[in-house]
Image (cartoon, rainbow, N blue to C red):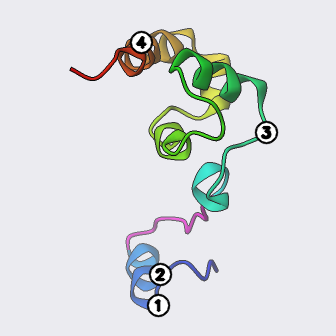
Amino acid sequence: MNAAWSPLQRETLEAMGLPLYRATGIAASGGLPDDPLVDALLRAAARNRDAEDAVRLARHWPPVHTLRKDPRAKRALWPQLRALRRPPA
């Protein structure tokens, strides 16, 4: 069992018949995955890996494996990335 879940949470999830997942990727590491697509998305958002909000932004994007397989997910992300490029009003 994952230590991130409290005993009450584990018991509740098990009672509902739900599996216990553990965080992976950005959520688990607290950093950005070493992936060229992540770097490209950050560039499209006028950011780089060192930007203060890079990890926070990436957490709200679909997983990289989804973006690679689903063109609709990638197209849906572009308006958000373009909005990040605009200077604050």
Q: Residues within 10 Å of mark 4 (few under 14, many from 20)?
A: few
Which residue does the numbered mark 2 point to in the structure image? 10
Closer to viewer: mark 3 or mark 1:
3
Magenta span of residues: 16-23
Which residue does the numbered mark 3 point to in the structure image? 34
- Cα–Cα gap, marks 2 and 4: 40 Å
**Residue type, mark 2 in image:** Arg
Of mark 3 and mark 4, the one earlier in the sequence is: 3
Mark number for residue 7? 1
Examine the rendered structure and indicate whether residue 22 appears above or below residue 45.
Answer: below
- Cα–Cα gap, marks 1 and 4: 43 Å
Q: Residues within 10 Å of mark 3 (few under 14, many from 20)?
A: few
Q: Considering the numbered disc 3 on the image, is that residue within a helix, a strand or a loop?
A: loop
> Where, by quadrant of the figure, is residue 81 drawn?
top left
Of mark 3 and mark 2, the one earlier in the sequence is: 2
Q: Residues within 10 Å of mark 1 (few under 14, many from 20)?
A: few
**Residue type, mark 4 in image:** Arg
x then y, percent, for residue 84: 40, 22
Could you tell me which residue is drawn at 56 percent across and 27 percent down?
Answer: 47
* Cβ atoms under marks 2 and 1 closer than 8 Å: yes
